[in-house]
Amino acid sequence: MAFAALKVLQGAGCDFADVYLEETLAGRVKMEAGRVDQLTQGGEFGAGLRLVRGEQTVFASTNDVSPAGLSAAARALVSAAGPGKISPETKGLSFFRSHLPGIELPGTVTWPERIQAAREAEAAARAAGAHIRQVTVFLGWNQQHIGIARSDGAWCEDARAQVVLWVNAVAGQGEKLQTGFESSGGSQGWETIREHGAVSTGRLAGERAQRLLTARPAPAGRGCVVLAAEAGGTMIHEAVGHALEADLVQKELSPYGNQLGQKVASPLISVADDATLAGWRGSFGCDDEGTPAQCTLLIDQGILKGFLHDRLTARQGGVSPTGNGRRQSYAHRPIPRMTNTMILPGREDAQAVIRSVPHGLYVVRMGGGQVNTVNGDFVFEINEAYLIENGVVTEPVLGTTMIGNAAEVLQSIDHVASDFGRGLGTCGKDGQGVPVADAQPTLRIPEITIGG
């Protein structure tokens, strides 16, 4: 039925067309104040149709995936696009199919077991300290099966599963309140909860909140910062990764547009985006345009090597797509997006990096912030940090931000450790959210502005 609708699109004349089919099952358990606040699970089936002609892209979606429904959506799309003369070149049929490995599908887990996992996380957070006042637990899961019919003759399928656990703990002492957050999960089945444990996620969130109650205000000014591996790569994702997405580059909304082959970072820095990593939150078998997952080296020892492309930006740039055409759902058109973005590990010992700092800040958890992708300026909140005094991590500090410019920071990094930590999240862009991960080793920024 997808190819029948695709034939209608091709008959209108186009450079490229595709029909994207998606079936999802998603659910959640939310606990608030010791009680189950939400229990939901539901499914959806729909299709997104796209026609590309020159600079024109026309997109439509429907939740009627019957042959008649898809045909009607295709005819409506053709009507909106108007008459055309260009016919796509069909290269012959090709097939790509990716199956889930032997995982425990989260949609098959019983409700009592899901609720028990949330309760265990909540109890562990509360047991972390006497000052824990409030705990919120969110346990979510998703199963997705997609199929893509393309005008070049390709049919691509991918089966995916996601499980995530977020725990937010609030500790209080008098009028002083501090929050600790921890997450776990990824592109995995329910075994990630069994193996890694809801208890450890809850405990870490509670311990973090409890620990920050003793924090004092952070110093302000210029200083040395060591970003811990467990900071998870937030800076590289927000301050650099988005600026390497090809749609922003081609719209001249990135400082890296004319710097291919040039030095954009310290020789110690290599950056990659890799959707092939088993179990990582941003991984898949193929992207939402049917391009197989791959690892894309973006910066190699300080030299800019490439950008993240979907099929449209790759066509415009005269390069191959990198498997970064992603969409939130069938109701959204694909755009270039990161998957698992990381600074690759170096060769130094992480403790040696810390010992190299007479006075500075050791950042363990980054928060939200603002980034100007045009020039790379950023401001990031720091959720958890500690003083470094004479090469030793000492007392916690709070209420601080990190202010800088991505290009300047990348050029200045002078120590990169061999350890590796990652974080997970949902990345927003153009009104769409997609699952991602980011990662980095421990690294040193010799001087940056710290806001108190």
Image (cartoon, helix red, strand yellow):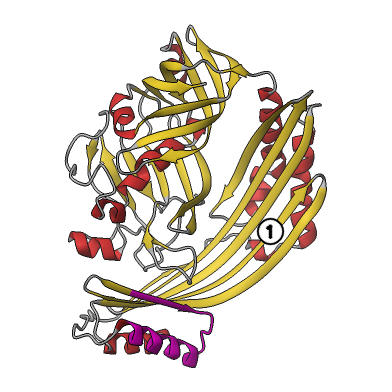
Q: Is residue 60 magenta?
A: yes
Is 126 situated left or right of 277 in this image? right
Percent of width and height locating residue 431 = 47, 59
Magenta range: 58-80
- For label 1, the SS is strand
Percent of width and height locating residue 311 = 29, 65
Quadrant in which the N terminus is drawn = bottom left
The residue type indicated by label 1 comes to: Arg
Read off the residue under disc 1: 28
Who's the residue at 67% across and 35% down the image? Answer: 205
Percent of width and height locating residue 330 = 48, 71
Magenta-highlighted stretch: main secondary structure?
Answer: helix
Query: Looking at the rendering, which quadrant does residue 233 occupy?
Result: top left
Q: Is residue 186 visible?
A: yes
Q: Is residue 439 visible?
A: no
Who's the residue at 60% across and 57% down the image? Answer: 189
Who's the residue at 30% across and 52% down the image? Answer: 248
Q: Say if 205 sits above or below 320 in the image.
A: above
Q: Residues within 10 Å of mark 1 (few under 14, many from 20)?
A: some
Residue closest to the eye, 352 or 54: 54
Percent of width and height locating residue 309 = 30, 57
Is 151 situated left or right of 85 in this image? right
